[in-house]
Amino acid sequence: MKSKLRVENVYKIFGDHPEQALEGLKQSKTKIEIFEETGQTVGVQDVSFDVREGEIFVVMGLSGSGKSTLVRTLNGLIPPTYGKILIDEDDVASCSAERLRRVRREKITMVFQHFALFPHKTVAENAAYGLKIKGEGASSRRAKALAALEQVGLAAYADSYPDELSGGMQQRVGLARGLATDPQILLMDEPFGALDPLIRREMQEELLHLQKKLKKTIIFITHDLNEALLLGDKIAIMKDGRFVQVGTAQEIVDNPADDYVAAFVGDIDRGRVFDAAHVAERPITVELGEKNAAEKALDLMEEHNRNALYVVEEDRIAGLVTYQELAVAAREEGRTDLSEVLVTEVPTVSRETPLNELYGAASAGYPIAVADKRGRLAGVIEPQAVFSQLSGEENEEAGSTTDQAVASSAEKGERQ
């Protein structure tokens, strides 16, 4: 998929002689050393990344890491010292002032941490402010503002004033103001940072809910790793103005690039980061009605060292059989029909089910079935794989391989 936003080797150096700072960076000097020697402040150094259309790209870093400076270069509020910032074919770093204004009007908007609502204007008037700047008429502004407020659940408060709303509701107005102009790209600079934890969580879920419908391209800035892991399709960890690591939540938690990143992810709840697909294996099955199915099932369980095996019927999950029950039945004359020992009440999840929701099913001891959207078996999760991943003991290579296997199996099933 084509990139909606592409950033290429962007630097932002504050001071009159940025070339001195650049030379210091080439010599691997730190930001502090460069400032002490030259008086130049390095805000962003050699940052490159791509954001695809409809993706949430999260930039996470501590205070002073350069993340807010970076996001302000993306819409030209702070011009970069070097590099390119391409929104479609427009280079924000070098285009004319007129072209930059057009890009801001038509393609990109920003949602700030502090709501910056006008206290003397109604909620609808605040939501319509960006449209007024664009020169739209009053009736059009009103209609679009009401539509945006409807999206964030505040249409009933259109004629109220900001001081009549809670902090979370005020932030929703700020979000509606951004959505009202129908931007292609949303820049969100710590938008939930001023909210208390419960309201912050609600806003995170609200954003994910909206994103499923609107599919905007979002660059989201945060200092909270849990927030980054929850929201980001891709996450960049930033330190001293540069990206230390870029990847999915699973990639970063499973394989931190250095000690700095490892320190961040050490206490993360892995059960919220990893999903069923990450620990699933390609299913080994027998068909319910096939000849000698019971003997085949026993052979497969012995070959693959499994104590249970899933049984399918015309690609649907019929249930599972355990080695112990099947072996006992096989020794009894005429008792080799799988249906006689079939367990039909089996744990079934989707590929996207978080691991923290699998603990109960894994504790029961049965392998867990991963079903595709049509109810067909796409993978199997052994209980030990769940416990190993939750404890951080899973082999990295095995996790990657099984994830790819179940993805391939599910995709193949969806095509059939």
Image (cartoon, rainbow, N blue to C red):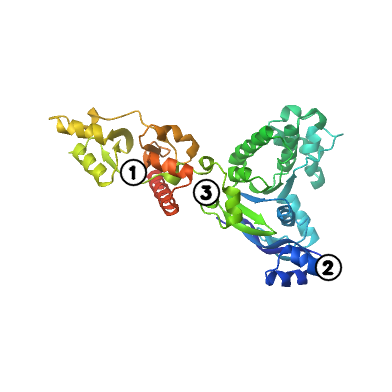
Amino acid beneath label 2: Asp
Please indicate whether residue 409 sits to the left or right of residue 13 in the image. left
- Residue sitting at x 75%, y 66%: 33
The residue lying toward the viewer, choosing from 346 and 116, is: 346
The residue lying toward the viewer, choosing from 414 and 57, is: 57
- Residue sitting at x 35%, y 46%: 282
Q: Separation of disc 1 and disc 3 at Cα?
A: 23 Å
Q: Which residue corresponds to mark 2? A: 16
- Residue 301: image location, x then y, percent: 26, 42
- Residue sitting at x 62%, y 36%: 205
Query: Would you call the spot at circle 3 few (<14 residues within 10 Å), some (14-19), or many (20 or more)?
Result: some
Q: Which residue corresponds to mark 1? A: 283
- Residue 26: image location, x then y, percent: 68, 71
Secondary structure of the residue carrying tag 1 is loop
Amino acid beneath label 3: Gln
The residue lying toward the viewer, choosing from 287 and 45, is: 45
Q: Separation of disc 1 and disc 2 at Cα?
A: 63 Å
